[in-house]
Amino acid sequence: MEKIFRSEDKEFLFTYTDINGSAVALSQFSGIAIVLTDIGGAVMNKYNNPAKVGFDSITISGNTALIRLQSDVTTTAKLGVIQDETKFQQVNTNFDDNREHTVSRSAGDLAEVVDSTTKNLTNLA
């Protein structure tokens, strides 16, 4: 499992495949949200594509989504594991409001937040 030190910036690249291992084209979805939670289940940060107020951005390419966990979040993050959940939205007239939602989670914990002696040092240049 990857470690994140408090006050560290970190990128996470998610790759999405179907149950057969084939790439899922993320362009087929009208919206994608990724939420990171701490060990207690509290939301650490949330991301959305397309851009939405209150969410950080997701960079989409093919079947991958890139998010950036900023140091202002990790500096005060609870020590312990981080988990992720992705929600996909696509147009489907068979569901309420013509939107179908599906949810995905990583098979294990995404990362672990560990303490850092340099967490309070900023603007080093």
Image (cartoon, grey):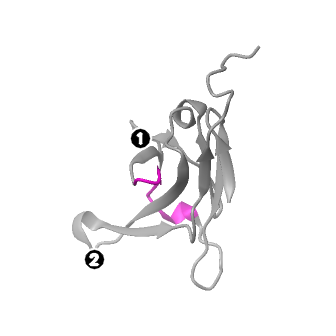
Disc 2 marks a residue whose amino acid type is: Asn
Please name the residue shown 49% across and 43% down the image.
Answer: 78
- Verify whether residue 29 appears in magenta: yes
Instruction: Residue 85: give x, y in percent of width and height.
Output: 47, 60
Nearer the camera: disc 2 or disc 1: 1
Can see residue 66?
no
Rendering quarter of residue 90: bottom left
Residues at circles 2 and 1 in contact by the CB criterion of under 8 Å: no
The residue range painted magenta reads 26-40
Q: Which residue is the extreme one toward the top? A: 125
Q: Is residue 13 left or right of residue 26?
A: right
Instruction: Residue 35: give x, y in percent of width and height.
Output: 46, 52
Which SS class for mark 1? loop
Instruction: Residue 44: give x, y in percent of width and height.
Output: 46, 44
Disc 1 marks a residue whose amino acid type is: Lys
Please name the residue shown 47% across and 62% down the image.
Answer: 29
Q: Which residue is mark 2?
A: 94
Q: Which sits in the foreground, 81 or 56?
A: 81
